């Protein structure tokens, strides 16, 4: 059984050359009539009646517009099909899809991140096997690999992501600050900004995943690229390793330094509460995925000229290189096993992961393409892709790699570390105890 952990970027790059309803979750549940136990393979619509597909996704801003345009194009090319496309905010999406899957009424086509989160549905026989239905050679190997289990493909990827530190270049220039290369330099920037009454780092962590990037980076920079994979695969170090305890201590040191805005554990990222702090000049930095650029272009296009990024710095004495990054694959599009019209659903997935859409995603939203053959012209896309292509190691998102129960505990304990309601040793102990319970060698 395949488990997803960190990936070697060097090896993956050597293998790869580099008229219906469009709605939002606020206005429609997105559920379809699946017909209960009706056979899924060759069901046909009644004469004159359109085949209906439901499609759930999380993209916003220009990404949403491109997705919607692709759905419209699909319907124009398939006049016998009506697609109900439902955009659901990221933070509500996982719960909504899990409920739909458990209730037997999933959307025909749905977004995922691959990894352990998709695998739970695959293991429950809720996802259609796409092997032979999509051309795996069209995708970057590491990206298609995130949706491949037991040598079978269960999703097609459109984009990849890395997590840099975004910053306000205007603020850095005003106070003569340079992007740091070492963690000591990073701390000096934080202290300088504090003295100038500027929030060093914006964060909105009510949904727990935004702050989890820090734990991932600290652990990797301290203990090297294999720390997570060893703990996950049960082949060496564990989740209560001293490096994880130290990572928790470094998190709490940042909190005590006042590195973050007050009340960050109660703010919601999806609504832009942390980003507004950067837009208004109240905060100088924010660690986030590559989709941050898409958010900026959608919410505050004038801020784009002030936006810069740098990789998370090295820690003196640590084993992780500055080139190593945290990242993942998103979106990955899959088809529900219960789809009444699987052939049409597969065709929609192929169009949603076409080179044409991938190029548009890169040009307009600075996305790193998971589809081969894309040319990088957008300055942010070039920089993000360069960050990924030069990385010696990609640490995949813990919450998309671990089994769901352990992933939730990871987010819970990390949020508690930031809230200073749990000690680093306690958090590491809880993670390892749960890992022993549910992970197998």
Image: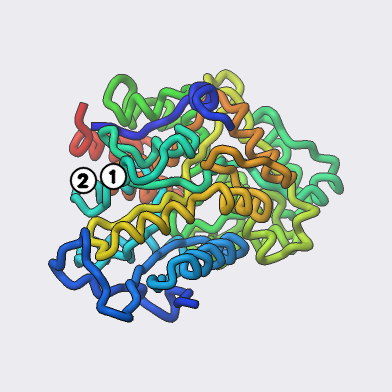
Q: Which mark is residue 123?
A: 2
In the rendered image, residue 157, in percent from the top left (x then y), is placed at 45, 46
Residue 133 position in % (x across, y down): 34, 46
366 sits left or right of 26 in the view: right
Q: Is residue 97 visible?
A: yes
Residue that protrudes farthest toward the left in the picture: 37
- Image quarter of the C terminus: top left
Residue visible at 57% across and 43% down in the picture: 369
The picture quadrant where one finds residue 344 is bottom left
Does residue 258 appear anywhere in the picture? no
Q: In which quarter of the image is the N terminus?
A: top left
Residue 208 disc label: none
Q: How crowded is mark 2: few (under 14 residues within 10 Å), some or many (20 or more)?
A: few
Q: Is mark 2 on a helix, strand or loop?
A: helix
Residue 396 coordinates in the image, percent (x, y): 44, 37
Q: Mark 1 points at which residue?
A: 119
């Amino acid at each position: 059984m395949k488990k997803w952990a960190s990936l070697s970027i060097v090896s993956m790059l050597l293998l790869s050359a580099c008229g219906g309803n469009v709605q939002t979750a606020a206005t429609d549940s997105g559920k379809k009539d699946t017909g209960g136990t009706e056979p899924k393979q060759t069901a046909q619509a009644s004469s004159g009646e359109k085949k209906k597909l439901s499609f759930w996704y999380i993209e916003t801003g220009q990404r949403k517009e491109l997705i919607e345009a692709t759905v419209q194009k699909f319907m124009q090319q398939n006049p016998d099909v009506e697609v109900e496309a439902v955009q659901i905010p990221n933070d509500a999406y996982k719960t909504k899809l899990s409920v739909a899957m458990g209730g037997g009424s999933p959307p025909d086509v749905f977004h995922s991140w691959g990894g352990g989160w998709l695998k739970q549905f695959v293991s429950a026989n809720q996802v259609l096997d796409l092997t032979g239905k999509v051309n795996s050679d069209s995708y970057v190997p590491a990206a298609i690999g995130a949706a491949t289990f037991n040598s079978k493909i269960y999703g097609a990827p459109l984009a990849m992501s890395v997590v840099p530190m975004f910053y306000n270049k205007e603020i850095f220039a005003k106070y003569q600050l340079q992007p740091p290369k070492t963690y000591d330099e990073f701390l000096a920037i934080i202290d300088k900004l504090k003295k100038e009454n500027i929030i060093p780092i914006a964060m909105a962590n009510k949904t727990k995943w935004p702050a989890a990037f820090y734990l991932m980076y600290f652990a990797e920079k301290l203990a090297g690229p294999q720390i997570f994979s060893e703990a996950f695969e049960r082949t060496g170090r564990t989740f209560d390793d001293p490096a994880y305890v130290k990572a928790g201590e470094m998190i709490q040191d940042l909190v005590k330094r006042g590195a973050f805005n007050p009340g960050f554990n109660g703010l919601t990222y999806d609504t832009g509460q942390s980003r507004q702090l950067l837009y208004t000049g109240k905060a100088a930095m924010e660690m986030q995925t590559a989709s941050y650029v898409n958010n900026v272009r959608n919410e505050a296009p004038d801020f784009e000229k002030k936006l810069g990024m740098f990789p998370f710095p090295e820690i003196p004495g640590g084993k992780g290189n500055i080139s190593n990054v945290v990242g993942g694959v998103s979106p990955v599009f899959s088809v529900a096993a219960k789809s009444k019209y699987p052939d049409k659903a597969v065709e929609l997935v192929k169009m949603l992961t076409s080179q044409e859409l991938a190029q548009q995603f890169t040009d307009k939203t600075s996305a790193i393409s998971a589809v081969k053959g894309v040319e990088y012209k957008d300055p942010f896309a070039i920089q993000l892709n360069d960050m990924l292509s030069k990385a010696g190691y990609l640490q995949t998102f813990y919450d998309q790699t671990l089994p769901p129960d352990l992933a939730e505990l990871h987010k819970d304990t990390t949020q508690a570390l930031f809230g200073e309601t749990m000690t680093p040793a306690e958090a590491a102990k809880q993670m390892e105890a749960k890992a022993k319970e549910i992970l197998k060698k």
